[in-house]
Image (spheres, rainbow, N blue to C red):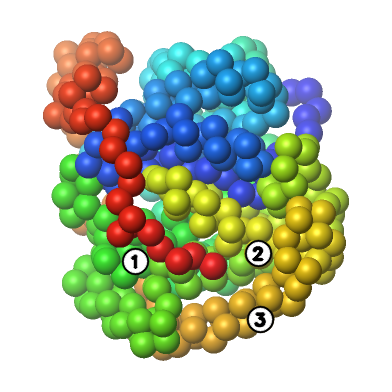
Amino acid sequence: MAQKTPLSAVLPPLIFGTATFNHQYNKDPYALDTNGLVQTALEHGIRAFDTSPYYGPSESLLGAALATPYVRASFPREEYFILTKVGRVASEEFDYSPEWVRASIARSLQRLQTPYLDAVYCHDVEFVSEDEVLTAIRELRRIRDQDGTIRYVGISGYPLDVLCRLAERVKQETGEPLDVVQSYANFTLQNTTLATKGAQRLQSAGVDVVPNASMLGMGLLRHDGVPLGSLGDWHPANDELRAAVRKASDFCDQHDERLEVIAMRFAMESWVAAGAAVGSRGDPASGVPWKRESIDDVGGKKLGVSVMGVSTAAELQKTLMVWRSILDGLENGQQTADTAGRWKRAHEWSLNRKRAVQILAEGVQECLGEWFDYAWDSPGKGFVNQRGAKKASEKDKTLKGKEAEAEAPWLTPAASPELKPESAKTELPLR
């Protein structure tokens, strides 16, 4: 393998996650203004997008948004990152075989309308054996080295011990550490174990970057409860944990705050520092309009990487407002704010807000009690990989047939309602 630039030297510390372009989080993802969201994100400095074949139409929607004439004329492909996944076919179906990995990569390239993928994860590795993961990693690296359509390889999943153990085994058995390990719902207001138990172990295994995804715990940490898309209530949190979160939400209400506002800022702001050792130095999206930014603009140090998920322009705008305020609170944050045309006291305000959020976060964690740092089982008890349980004859199905089977129950673009203006009641005062 030729010497390559470490992912941590180039990956932006804020990634646009497109799991929201899916039926789990939205009843009809085709009704979202995905083209407008992606365009606005790029215009505001976002330079990385995370997706997966498992996220329903997410890859196709993202690919179409990145292929519009305006985006292609304004943002060359080499200026932004696309991260996707392989291995998870359906909710209870996984295929990590080399044949499926190759076919899945080919399909992702086609859906995303790109000649290469910046990073590819093995998706939700806890649902298959370690040997299967090692097989997929080797095939992804073969594609990287021989075909050149992949640049970085990693794994993603929920149980921290599984992620750490696999990272250690990959390094030991292949002699090459993973470029990236994405953890989700493990650095939130409810669960901070990615910082206390995971990051150091992953770093010791040679992992370069550890993005923190699902900062609201897959939607658990919301005033209105878990999001209900066309799949109904799919969230794995039990009734006791949900009750504790409602108590925490009531606590925030008493202090004129929203739970999701505190949760989002706490996770992004705290992980900037807590995840710095496994962070990155890419474009920080600090808000200087129409300028290729550098990490030097915000101090030059690595920042912990966060994956945001939004469904509307209002959510994107407010998340970016929070992110930029966090950057304003860094050591040279006032200079950043001045360059971007923000308030002359932005640095001071950011530090005060950080302190207020930290105090409320401690109150929320008191409300959670025994459910603080709790992790639900993944996979759940009795899980069987339906892919492996099927008869051998069914393995001959084409990708096209499998895709049609998986997506048939959902709305298609033609069946989706006409896009309507966003309702004002969905607005949330993020800050």
Q: Read off the residue under disc 2.
A: 325
Q: Residues within 10 Å of mark 1 (few under 14, many from 20)?
A: many
Determine whether, in the image, residue 249 is placed left or right of residue 277.
left
Q: Is residue 328 left or right of residue 398?
A: right
The residue carrying pointer 2 sits among few (fewer than 14), some (14 to 19) or many (20 or more) residues within 10 Å by Cα, namely: many
Q: Report helix, strand or loop for mark 1.
A: loop
Mark 3, other Cα within 10 Å: few <14 / some 14–19 / many ≥20:
few
Image x and y of residue 325, in percent = 65, 64
Tell me, yes or no, whether the two marked residues, 3 and 2, touch with CB atoms within 8 Å: no
SS under mark 3: helix
Instruction: Say whether disc 3 or disc 2 marks the residue closer to the N-terminus.
Output: 2
Is residue 411 or residue 176 the one in the foreground? 411
In the rendered image, the quadrant that contains the C terminus is bottom right
How far apart marks 3 and 2 lie (CA) works out to 11 Å
Q: Earlier in the sequence, mark 2 or mark 1?
A: 1
Q: Up-down: is 151 above or below 270?
A: above
Residue visible at 66% across and 41% down? Answer: 45
- Three-letter amino acid code at disc 3? Asn
Rendered image quadrant of residue 220: bottom left
In the picture of the structure, the residue carrying the numbered disc 1 is: 222
Quickly name the residue at label 3. 352
Disc 2/disc 1 C-alpha distance (Å):
21 Å
Residue at point 73% right, 37% down?
290
Using the image as rendered, state which of residue 286 and residue 231 is in the foreground: 286
User: How far across and how far down the image is residue 226, in percent?
Assistant: 27, 60
Q: Position of residue 246 (x, y in %)?
A: 27, 77
State which tag comes first along the sequence, 3 or 1.
1
Marks 2 and 1 in Cβ contact (< 8 Å) = no
